[in-house]
Each structure stands twice: as structure tokens, then as C-alpha cells.
Image (spheres, helix red, strand yellow):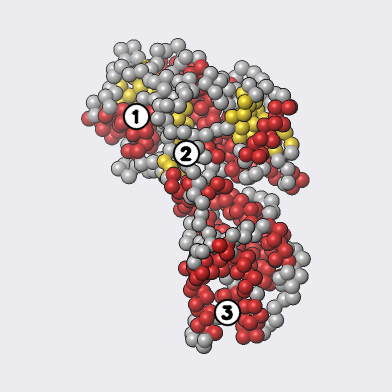
């Protein structure tokens, strides 16, 4: 175990301090995660007051952003990092926190006055203790509501919604202003709803632009509320994040929010809302910079609330593209099929525009500073089991115990058992079985019902793999093999067959079995089938994701043995462990 204590950046420039903290931690994590000398060690990232863990906490804004980055690194490299936030930097308390967190399988903990706290999401039903916020006052309908990112997909939807709810003066700030596609049509539409909309051109990341836009608000319609919805995505794994990617993401979120905070703090606002993201709370893999930026927004709103200023941070889940408009610039519009399959498996559902706006209405009536409006299928979440449910959701669901047959009560094959089994095979048979393992995991990542549709020689790029799906495959293979594979795995080994050959030599480099004879299937079939019983017993610990595919393979093999046309014994011998388990579970039934 190694402890890393990120330094609190010096200076009075908050946005510069944020960049320094994020950049420094990114460098440390890059070294830690890519250096094989640390592969078997746990990194404890210990921050001091980076979180608003209790009402009244005033978290350090720079360390909060760094903490958000670390959350993403946790999901990119499961089991490699533990996050501890303390109120006092004492070694004894830290040791106790690490021991308890490890025993309880908690990846993130906070220490406050000697008490150990863990993050959990709860329904906002009004019964929970307030986190220091207050319900928004009813705004003057003739006052001006500023929406940054006002001509983006979310900004347009919110502007229409506010106009339909009685807002009469809207100020929509965007980089292109009136030159944005569809801007004139939006203004006309808002006018029909009874709202006068002004389009302002400016970069919210530039203080001078924000100051100019605010100065132009007419005294007869003073600024009464701010909604900071501007944001940019520039995804990348923590280990490969560039300074340019970090800057692209931090500028509109962090700089924009800070300028708005400083330039309006003396105004009598009834609302100040930041469109944050669930990425800052969960730590989405591949979105380290975005998680950092949104964690900053959450912390800034905590600081505002502690100072008695209006503050609300909405950690939105994904919004689906608005089917009622032609806009496709939403942050969920470019999701690939693999991304959607990953979300479906974990119970995350994209919010429709109607659902999102209904949650906006609910949030504005709450006295909570930080809310996470997100679409969740709790039945699917519960089905992930004790090991699969994200710690943040453990208080929302009870894990469903998966029914298993009596013969599958044996534990799943461990990496050590896998290595021993493969080591007894010939190199050819070893590579064949590793390929089946790889193809099965690829099918799971892509959301395929079986591995039949995954070509062994198909490039990963053609299969639809991106950085996030690559990381998921890497993590699955790490779990199965016990290896510490890099995030660049599919780029270094561009097809499933090439990857399987590499893994075979890594898992069982000294395969001891003899090579198969060059005779036909009639000579080697009985010998291979004699090992089926052992393979079946080993397969019983797996899952039945490929039931239909295996059923066809085995029936075809039996037809071949009976002299009927169909598949030969080779297909049976190439069946994966998961397939064998699925077949036996179907035929024997659950005991």
C-alpha cells in the first residue's frame, strides 16, 4: 500500500489552483497506473477537506476537482485505488480508515471528527437531513434569467420549459449567439410562449465576456437567476489525458462557474443552479477531466450555500436526444451501441426531455444543495448482485441472489486455476480456449447474445470498440486472468485472435501438453471428448450467457457422430467454458 497526499495548491487564483491540482494528480496517477512495479499495490489517495461530506463543510475547490478525477481513475482501474478524505491529516486515523474501508469493500470514505462516512445516494423525499441548502424563492417573472450554453440542446429545452412556466425575460449566452443554427426560430418560439429572449454572444470562460453580458442586463429587468448549463466533453483515459483535453473541459465548466459566482455574488438572486453531471459523483471511466470539472461545480455550490448564497448543483444523468427537434448536439447524442449496451447492463437509463424537465421542477422545490437527477432501472441494478452494485447505490436496492443449480455451487474458476488448466494443454488448444474466453467477453461488452457474431479476425475498431469499451474488456480480462493489462490492450493487439494469442503466452507461457496430431477429427475426436466431463465441471461456475449458441453446436456435433450432415466435433471441442456451462445448466435444470 502506498499513500499519496495531493498538495493543496497555493495562490488566490481559484481556476489556476484547480488546474494545478488536476494536472499534478493526473501525472501521479499516470505513473502509478502504467508502471508494472506497482501492479500489485494499492494506492491510497488521501485528501484533506476535498468533500462537502456534511452540511456546512466548505471543501477546497481545487482538491474537490482532483478528487473527481480520482473517482474516474477508480473505475478505469478497479481495485487499484482507495480514496480517503479527512478533516485532520493524522496517520492513525488514516490507517484505521483504510482498514475499515478495505474490510467493507468501500472504495471511498471520509473522516469527520473521528467518524467514518461513506457516500450513498438516497431518494429526495424531504425526510433526509438538509445539506445546508434552501428552497428557491419564486422569481419575479419580469426579472431576467441567464442560461449559459443557452443555445445548446439542454439550454434550448430549459428555455422553452421556463417560458411555458411563466418566465418573461430570458438571456441565452452562447459562443455564437444569434449566429447559432436555429437561433432565430428559437426566439420566435419563445415569443409565442410569452417570453422575450435576448441572445448574447460570448465565451463564459472569459471573465470580460461574462462581465459585459451582465452589464447589458436592463435595470428594468434585473438579473434574478442564473443557470450554468455550458459544458464540453473531451473524453480520454486518465493515464492518457493531455493538457489540451483537460483545458477544453475545465474552461467552460470551472472558469464559467467561477466568473458567474464572483460577478453576481452581490446581486439579489433567487436562484443559482449549475448543470453538473453524475460523472462527477460516480466517476465515469474515460471522463476524468469531465468528472473533475463537475466535482468542482458541486463543491462551489456547497461553498455558496455555506455563505448564505443561493446554490444548487444538479448532477444530471444522461439525457436522450430530443426527438421533437433537429438538435443533435447533446452530450448523449453520439453514444455508440457499445456505450448504450454498457448503460443498459448497469441499469442506467437516459432521461427523456420530458423526464428531465419534470426532475428540474422537482429539484427547484427542494432545499437540497446537491441533487443527482438520473434515470435508474433499480431492478436491473439489484440484479447486478452484491459485487456488481455500485457502492453509491447500495442503500437504494437489495441485491438479488442469482439462482444457480446445485452442481454450480463450486466457486468460479480463479486466475490461478485458469493458468493451471491452460498449462496442461498444448499451445494450440490453449490458444483455442483463450480465444473462446476473449470472444465471450467481447460479446458481453458489446451486448451480443452470444459470441457467434464476433469474428476472431475482425479488427476491434470495426467491431465498434472505443476507449470505454476497451477499458471494460481490459477489466473483464484482468479479472479472468489475474493479469495487469494496459488500457491500450485492443490497440496493441488489434484483433481478438491476436489478443488471444498474446494472453495465452502471458497466462500459461509454459503450456506442457503435446500438440494435437495432424490426423483428422475421427482420430482426435474421442480423445477430446474424454476431457469433456472435466471441462463441464469447470464450466459450472460460469454464467449461461450463450445458451442458444452452444445448444446448436452440440446438437450439430451429435448429428455428425450419427452420420448426419452438419457440424463436426471440432465445433464441440472449441466450445467455451461459458458455453459448456450454459448447455449443462439447460439440460440438467436447476436443482
Q: Position of residue 372 (x, y in %)?
A: 45, 33
* Of the pair 11 and 577, the residue shown nearer to us: 577
84 left or right of 150 in image: right
Q: Using the rendered view, name the quadrant where residue 477 is placed.
A: bottom right
163 left or right of 253 in image: left
Q: Residue drawn 53% across and 79% down?
A: 557
Q: Secondary structure at mark 3?
A: helix
> What residue sits right under mark 2 in the picture?
396
Q: Residue drawn 60% across and 19% down?
A: 13
Among the two numbered marks 1 and 3 on one chain, the one whose residue lies closer to the N terminus: 1
Q: Using the rendered view, name the quadrant where residue 578 is placed.
A: bottom right
From mark 2 to mark 1, how far is it between C-alphas? 22 Å
- Disc sitting over residue 569 in the figure: 3
From mark 2 to mark 3, how far is it between C-alphas? 48 Å
Which part of the image, by quadrant, shows the N terminus? top right
Among the two numbered marks 2 and 3 on one chain, the one whose residue lies closer to the N terminus: 2
Disc 3 crowd, CA 10 A, few/some/many (<14, 14-19, 20+): many
From mark 1 to mark 3, how far is it between C-alphas? 62 Å
* Of the pair 279 and 100, the residue shown nearer to us: 100
Q: Nearer the viewer, mark 2 or mark 1?
A: 2
**Is 384 placed above or below 295 here?**
below
Q: Secondary structure at mark 1?
A: helix
Tell me, yes or no, if residue 293 can be seen here: no
Q: Residue drawn 51% across and 51% down?
A: 401
* Of the pair 539 and 341, the residue shown nearer to us: 539
Q: Using the rendered view, name the quadrant where residue 246 is placed.
A: top right
385 left or right of 143 in image: right
Q: Are marks 2 and 1 in contact (CB under 8 Å)?
A: no
Q: Secondary structure at mark 2?
A: loop
Among the two numbered marks 2 and 1 on one chain, the one whose residue lies closer to the N terminus: 1
> What residue sits right under mark 1 in the picture?
361
Disc 1 crowd, CA 10 A, few/some/many (<14, 14-19, 20+): few
Amino acid at each position: 500500500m502506498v499513500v499519496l497526499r495531493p498538495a493543496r495548491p497555493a495562490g488566490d487564483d481559484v481556476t489556476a489552483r484547480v488546474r494545478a491540482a488536476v494536472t499534478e494528480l493526473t501525472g501521479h496517477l499516470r505513473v502509478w497506473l502504467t508502471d508494472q512495479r506497482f501492479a500489485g499495490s494499492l494506492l491510497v489517495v488521501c485528501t484533506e477537506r476535498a468533500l462537502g461530506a456534511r452540511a456546512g463543510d466548505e471543501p477546497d475547490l481545487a482538491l474537490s476537482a482532483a478528487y473527481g478525477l480520482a473517482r474516474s481513475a477508480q473505475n478505469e482501474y478497479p481495485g487499484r485505488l482507495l480514496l480517503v478524505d479527512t478533516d485532520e491529516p493524522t496517520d492513525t486515523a488514516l490507517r484505521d480508515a483504510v482498514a475499515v474501508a478495505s474490510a467493507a469493500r468501500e472504495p471511498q470514505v471520509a473522516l469527520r471528527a473521528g467518524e467514518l462516512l461513506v457516500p450513498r445516494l438516497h431518494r429526495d423525499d424531504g425526510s433526509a437531513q438538509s445539506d445546508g441548502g434552501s428552497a428557491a424563492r419564486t422569481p419575479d417573472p419580469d426579472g431576467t434569467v441567464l442560461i449559459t450554453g443557452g443555445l445548446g440542446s439542454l439550454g434550448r429545452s430549459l428555455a422553452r420549459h421556463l417560458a411555458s412556466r411563466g418566465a418573461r425575460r430570458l438571456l441565452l449566452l452562447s459562443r455564437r449567439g444569434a449566429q447559432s443554427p436555429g437561433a432565430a426560430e428559437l426566439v420566435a418560439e419563445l415569443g409565442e410562449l410569452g417570453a422575450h429572449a435576448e441572445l448574447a454572444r460570448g465565451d463564459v470562460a472569459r471573465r470580460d465576456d461574462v462581465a459585459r453580458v451582465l452589464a447589458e442586463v436592463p435595470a428594468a429587468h434585473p438579473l434574478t437567476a442564473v443557470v450554468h448549463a455550458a459544458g464540453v466533453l473531451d473524453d480520454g483515459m486518465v493515464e492518457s489525458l493531455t493538457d489540451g483535453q483537460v483545458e477544453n473541459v475545465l474552461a467552460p465548466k470551472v472558469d464559467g462557474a467561477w466568473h458567474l459566482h464572483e460577478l453576481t455574488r452581490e446581486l439579489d438572486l433567487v436562484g443559482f443552479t449549475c448543470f453538473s453531471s453524475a460523472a462527477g459523483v460516480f466517476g465515469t471511466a474515460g471522463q476524468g477531466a469531465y468528472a473533475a470539472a463537475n466535482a468542482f461545480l458541486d463543491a462551489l455550490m456547497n461553498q455558496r450555500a455555506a455563505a448564505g448564497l443561493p446554490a444548487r448543483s444538479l448532477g444530471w444523468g444522461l439525457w436522450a436526444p430530443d426527438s421533437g427537434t433537429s438538435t443533435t448536439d447533446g452530450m448523449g447524442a453520439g453514444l455508440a451501441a457499445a456505450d448504450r449496451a454498457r448503460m443498459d447492463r448497469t441499469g442506467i437509463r437516459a432521461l427523456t426531455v420530458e423526464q428531465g424537465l419534470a426532475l428540474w421542477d422537482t429539484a427547484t422545490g427542494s432545499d437540497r444543495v446537491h441533487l443527482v437527477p438520473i434515470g435508474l432501472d433499480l431492478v436491473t441494478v439489484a440484479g447486478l448482485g452484491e459485487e456488481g452494485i455500485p457502492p453509491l447505490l447500495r442503500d437504494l436496492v437489495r441485491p438479488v441472489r442469482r439462482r444457480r443449480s446445485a452442481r454450480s455451487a463450486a466457486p468460479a474458476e480463479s486466475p490461478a486455476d485458469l493458468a493451471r488448466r491452460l498449462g496442461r494443454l498444448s499451445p494450440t488448444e490453449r490458444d483455442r480456449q483463450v480465444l473462446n474466453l476473449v470472444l465471450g467477453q467481447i460479446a458481453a461488452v458489446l451486448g451480443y447474445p452470444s459470441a457467434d457474431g464476433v469474428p476472431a479476425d475482425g479488427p476491434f475498431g470495426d467491431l465498434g470498440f472505443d476507449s470505454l469499451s476497451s477499458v471494460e474488456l481490459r477489466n473483464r480480462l484482468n479479472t479472468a486472468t489475474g493479469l495487469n493489462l494496459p488500457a491500450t490492450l485492443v490497440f496493441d493487439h488489434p484483433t481478438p485472435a491476436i489478443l488471444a494469442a498474446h494472453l495465452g503466452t502471458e497466462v500459461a507461457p509454459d503450456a506442457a501438453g503435446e500438440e494435437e496430431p495432424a490426423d483428422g477429427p475421427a482420430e482426435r475426436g474421442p480423445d477430446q471428448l474424454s476431457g469433456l466431463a472435466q471441462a463441464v465441471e469447470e464450466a459450472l461456475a460460469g454464467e449461461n450467457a450463450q445458451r442458444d449458441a452452444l445448444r446448436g453446436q452440440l446438437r450439430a456435433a451429435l448429428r455428425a457422430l450419427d452420420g448426419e450432415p452438419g457440424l463436426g466435433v471440432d465445433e464441440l471441442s472449441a466450445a467455451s467454458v461459458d458455453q459448456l456451462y450454459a448447455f449443462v445448466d439447460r439440460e440438467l435444470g436447476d436443482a
